[in-house]
Image (cartoon, helix red, strand yellow):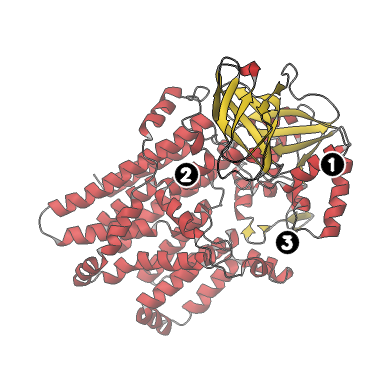
Amino acid sequence: MSGRVFVVLCAIVFLLLAFAWIDLPGPQQDELLHFPVVSPLLRASIPREAQFADYNLPLMVMSYVGALKGWLLWLWFRVAPESVAGYRALGILAGLVTVGLIWGFTRRHYGRPVALLTTALISTDPSFVQGIRIDYGPVALAHLLRMGGLVALSGWLESGSRRALAGGMFLFGLGLWDKANFVWFLAGLGATVALLYPREALRRLRANPAVLPIGIAALLIGSAPLLSYNLKNRGQTWRERGVLEVKWFKLQQAQHTFHGTFMASLTGEDHLHSSPPAHDVRFPRLAHWMYRLGGRSQTILMPLLAVAVLALPVTLWIAGRLGAARRLLFPLLLAILTYAGMFFSLQGGESAHHVVMLWPFPHLFLAASLWLTADRWPGRVPRVAAVAVTLAAVVVNLSVNARHLAIYTRTGGTREFSDAIYRLVPYLAENPKRKLVALDWGFSHPVAFLGSRWNLVAEDIFYALLPEEEAGYRALQLRRLGELMRDPDTLFLMHSPQRTIFPAAAREFFALADGGIEMRQAAFFEERSGEIVYEIYQAGRGAATPGQPEVQVAFLPGRVAPQQDYVMEAPELADSWIDIVYHVDGVSSGTATRFCRLDAAGRARLTTPATHPAATVRVTRIRRSGEAWRPARGSITVVR
């Protein structure tokens, strides 16, 4: 099989994994971070740093995230539908080009066999594929600009073309504009070149001194929007992000990324088996096969890399005899130094969309370690073994990707990725003139994007109610919240207690309601698992669910100590397993699936956990497992 045919096959596999059931999971707030650039209604809410004729053009979405993807989306939507599928397609196509660039770069510097192994590994890597599919980082353009710049600089190294040099550095500059943490990669690349190729770098500069100003100028031009923003705002990017920190849990996030489990945990893996089989998706039988094939929950990339690192002295000795020692070390050092930059940065490396910036260099190091060792020994067995190891990794990758697709099709996504947003937005559009107020993170961008035809806009008021806000400003916003709560034409968008991300606004909302402002729950929306995810409140009296009477839940005794037995009673739900939604002192909440089984009299004898804190636990919703939720009332107090 020719190399090009193999790369085309890898590209097809990548596209199939990335495009399958493309509307799932539901669109997430950060995934749609760049939509305000596209939307005239929202454009005024982001920094406007350039003016053309009578138009103010945003250059930055946040202090460290540029509007590059937003303007590309603006062009893309001229030919593609403005839908979730269309939005995600742009990132996936960027990922497809990245796969081709990875093939070209590795083939040029490491030869065809290493390039084949690397391309096979990266095109099926779950963190790469699923991260680009959802692109909540964002990461798709960063991958493209990083590899595009490296390929262009490789062309300059081979031909001496100043155009290639300028092009590569310009792409790196665009990477900085796209997201300022691209500097982690640039710093890692510069340090790696300085450590491995110091003489060659100095020789290049002495032989042609003009390359330095050309490269710097191209980098500055590419990153000009970021620089302009910081000049006008007194270095805001640096002031906000230029802080050193050490948090060891970042290593755990890196481990999740290498295992390929991060996106699964974000989008609903904990509900995979409890959710019903996929039935309202295209090709439900294929979706069921994804569930059957997704038996692996994590990749074998990390153990393979661990073996490659342990074998490094031997591999280096072999590579040294071939004159390839520095080429072997290049991807390893680049990955380590890039990760060091993010690890010591404020909030750097705290999520998969940071760690995945190391890709494809760990994969390249693994492929080079396998092939350089195998190719040195006589006979075909070592080469076959290297291919077999890579094939095993690819098969496991495919299984983990199938698991992700099973999660999407069975659960629809959970939490901030829930496909319940597709049911929420049409409900809000029934009366598009009502004011929408978001009391938690995760509503404004999905509502505006999916509701663009109705000009829906949800105001993010919850930021102003966070405890860290200045006291006077926060008090002013609390008064405004009270005024909005008295307006019957205002809808308040909240997550259910167990799905709430920033609870401060919800606490203030319910405190005002308890203080006399009458509010009713106008609607709620469930995930496919039956878990309530969205709650809608409106001024006035009345029940949210007509025809669903409140279930009275009794606890005997009403006050218990840890390890003390008590009886729970709900006669209406006798002889069944029950699920409950509970609140603990109004501070925390959660859902207990199959909490207990009630007997024929509707009773269950339970024991208070030994470690349960002193608190009052209130049951607010209850159901027979698998049925619809019903409002509930009942509480028990734990004393110590």
Q: For the residues carrying marks 3 and 2, which lies nearer the camera in this image? A: 2
Q: Dot 1: what SS? A: helix
Q: Are marks 3 and 1 in contact (CB under 8 Å)?
A: no
Question: Circle 2 sits on which residue?
Answer: 130
| 255 sits to left or right of 623 | left
Q: Secondary structure at mark 2?
A: helix
**Pointer 3: residues within 10 angstroms few (<14), some, or many (20+)?**
some
Q: Quadrant of residue 288?
A: top left
To which residue does mark 1 refer?
A: 512
Using the rendered view, name the quadrant where residue 585 is placed: top right
Q: Is residue 161 visible?
A: yes
> Could you give the CA–CA distance between mark 3 and mark 2, rounded to whole angstroms?
33 Å
Image position of 275 (left or right of 229):
left
The residue that disc 3 covers is 49
The amino acid at mark 1 is Leu
Residue found at the very far bottom of the displayed protein = 206
> Residue at coordinates 31% horizontally, 59% vertically from top-left?
306
Quote the CA–CA distance across marks 3 and 1: 39 Å
